[in-house]
Amino acid sequence: MDTLNNAMQYIIRMKQEGKIDSFEVVGLEPHGSDFNGFVLITGDRETVAQLRAEDEFVSVMVGVQLVHRNVRVVGAYTGAELQSWFAMWDEQEDKLLGE
């Protein structure tokens, strides 16, 4: 629990310092997979990318990985950025189909 509490304190501090916009902890109901939950962190893409490269972030993630299996850090798109991502998807799909 100390490792997870440390990770949560880190995320709370990142919110207080304005490095992220928000975060939400999500637990998933049993569904036969190793994916049991996640923390959704939102913020400016460049700022979050820089945060992910900082030694403290990496250290916190290493700690979490030592007490939990299958820990992942994955970028995602929401809101207006999701529409941009869909547009890129459509553009690449059109190229593949020769349109």
Image (spheres, helix red, strand yellow):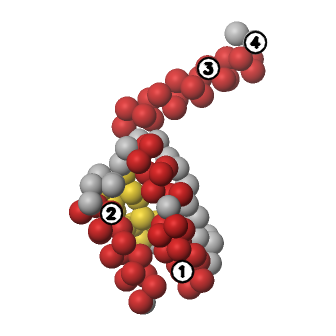
The residue indicated by pointer 2 is 14
Q: Secondary structure at mark 1?
A: helix
The residue indicated by pointer 3 is 91
How far, Cα to Cα, is label 4 from label 3?
A: 11 Å
Q: Secondary structure at mark 4?
A: loop
First in residue order: circle 4 vs circle 1:
1
Position in image of residue 61 (x %, y %): 53, 72
Pair 4/1: label in front: 1
The answer to whether residue 90 is above or below residue 27 is: above
The answer to whether residue 97 is above or below residue 1 is: above
How far, Cα to Cα, is label 1 from label 2?
A: 17 Å
Q: Quadrant of residue 74?
A: bottom right
The residue indicated by pointer 1 is 63
Pair 3/1: label in front: 1
Q: Quadrant of residue 26?
A: bottom left
First in residue order: circle 4 vs circle 3:
3
First in residue order: circle 3 vs circle 2:
2
Q: Is residue 30 visible?
A: no
Q: Amino acid at mark 2?
A: Met
Q: Residues within 10 Å of mark 3 (few under 14, many from 20)?
A: few
Q: Residues within 10 Å of mark 4 (few under 14, many from 20)?
A: few
Q: Amino acid at mark 3?
A: Glu
Which quarter of the image is occupied by the C terminus?
top right
The residue indicated by pointer 4 is 98
Q: Secondary structure at mark 2?
A: helix
Pointers 4 and 2 in contact (CB under 8 A)? no
Q: Residues within 10 Å of mark 1 (few under 14, many from 20)?
A: some
Q: Is residue 9 visible?
A: yes
Q: Amino acid at mark 4?
A: Gly
Seen in the image, is 96 located left or right of residue 19? right
Pointers 3 and 2 in contact (CB under 8 A)? no
